[in-house]
Image (tube, helix red, strand yellow):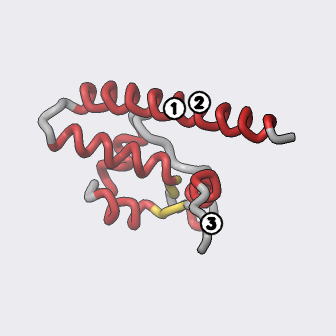
Amino acid sequence: MNEFNFFEELEFLTKLKVGIGETSEITGIPQRQLRYWENKGIISSLPHEKGNVRRYDYTTIKKILLIKEQLDEGYTLEGAIKKVNKRIEYVEEMFEKIKEKENQDDNQFM
């Protein structure tokens, strides 16, 4: 049985790139709104490749979903963004602490 490796899963997710149409389907946010959010600097797409199609990574899709969740709960767009950005900062800090702990554990056995 294969052991679940969180960082392998995370590496896979960092390689994920999804077009604007698929992102719209996944999130339930219309493409027009995604473009608006991008123009306002709320989200960002990856550098355009063939055909000038906007592509989004996992982190951006997750951010879109979190913003949508806050909007659905009645927050304004500005309020939702502030709350989501705080949440993302917290999660990133936790990932750093996990990485540091794993590195410390790995170094103990060398």
Task: Name the residue that disc number 2 marks.
Answer: 97
User: Closer to us: mark 1 or mark 3?
Assistant: 1
The circle drawn on residue 74 is none
Q: In what quadrant of the picture does the C terminus appear?
A: top right
Residue 5 vertical placement versus 67 (above, below): below
Task: Name the residue that disc number 1 marks.
Answer: 94
Give the residue at x 49% y 62%: 18
Q: Secondary structure at mark 2?
A: helix
Q: x and y percent of residue 84 in the render?
A: 35, 33
Tell me whether the residue at label 1 lies in contact with that at label 2, contact meaning CB atoms closer than 8 angstroms: yes
Most extreme residue toward the front is 109
**Distance between the Cα atoms at labels 1 and 3?**
36 Å
Q: Quadrant of residue 29?
A: bottom left
Give the residue at x 42% y 42%: 38
Q: Secondary structure at mark 3?
A: helix
Q: In what quadrant of the picture does the N terminus appear?
A: bottom right
Asked if residue 65 lies left or right of residue 76, the reply is right
Give the residue at x 47% y 63%: 19
Asked if residue 84 lies left or right of residue 8, the reply is left
Tell me whether the residue at label 1 lies in contact with that at label 3, contact meaning CB atoms closer than 8 angstroms: no
The three-letter amino acid code for the residue at tag 1 is Met
Task: Name the residue that disc number 3 marks.
Answer: 50
Decide which of tag 2 and tag 3 comes sooner along the chain: 3
Most extreme residue toward the bottom is 1
